[in-house]
Amino acid sequence: MKSGEKFVLGSIMALLVFSVIRSELHVEEKHEREIPYYSTATHEVAERANDIYRENGCKECHSLWTMKDMMETVPAPILDGIGSLRTEAWLYDYLSASNPQSILPTRLKKQFGMPSYASLPESDRRVLAKYLASLKVKDWYLKETREAEQKKLHGTE
């Protein structure tokens, strides 16, 4: 092999090694451009749950699939990714409780606490719980989601 060929081959190898190292270092950057939230719900469940969400004024306090304006809403949890933190059974029990604060105490003033939805038809509570449980967060963003939930609940991470 001639020295010129060795130089070209060495340059190609150096570029390949540099490219692999660079791509590994920028994995987090790729995630920053990716939306971490998704839903596993069927179209029918999502449609009915969104109707219930709108009809009951849930968007007055909670945001879903949107950016939240802290100046216009109560500082209630964002629902994106809630299904990675709570099970469907837990969500159903919470929505069915006559006093939701007995299940999950709030740091908010009493007038801003989660109201009871025990009076909703059971089928609506089940659909809403099923949909909320379907709102997942990708594994690479789960730690941040848990920390945000802890901060919201306890004021600490």
Image: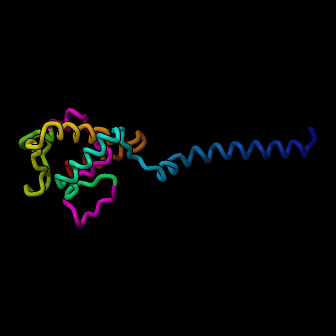
The residue stretch that appears in magenta: 66-93
* Residue at figure coordinates x 91%, y 44% from the top left: 3
Q: Residue furthest right?
A: 2
- In the depicted structure, whether residue 73 falls above or below residue 130: below
- In the depicted structure, whether residue 113 falls above or below residue 44: below
For the N terminus, give its image quadrant.
top right
Is residue 108 visible from the viewing direction of this image? yes
- In the depicted structure, whether residue 151 falls above or below residue 88: below
Tell me residue 156's x, y (percent): 24, 50
Number of marks in picture? 0
* Residue at figure coordinates x 29%, y 60% from the top left: 68
* Residue at figure coordinates x 36%, y 38% from the top left: 40
Give left or right: position of 68 versus 106.
right
* Residue at figure coordinates x 32%, y 44% from the top left: 81
Tell me residue 133's x, y (percent): 28, 38
Is 80 or 42 nearer to us in this picture?
A: 42
Tell me residue 48's x, y (percent): 26, 44
Give left or right: position of 64 versus 31.
left
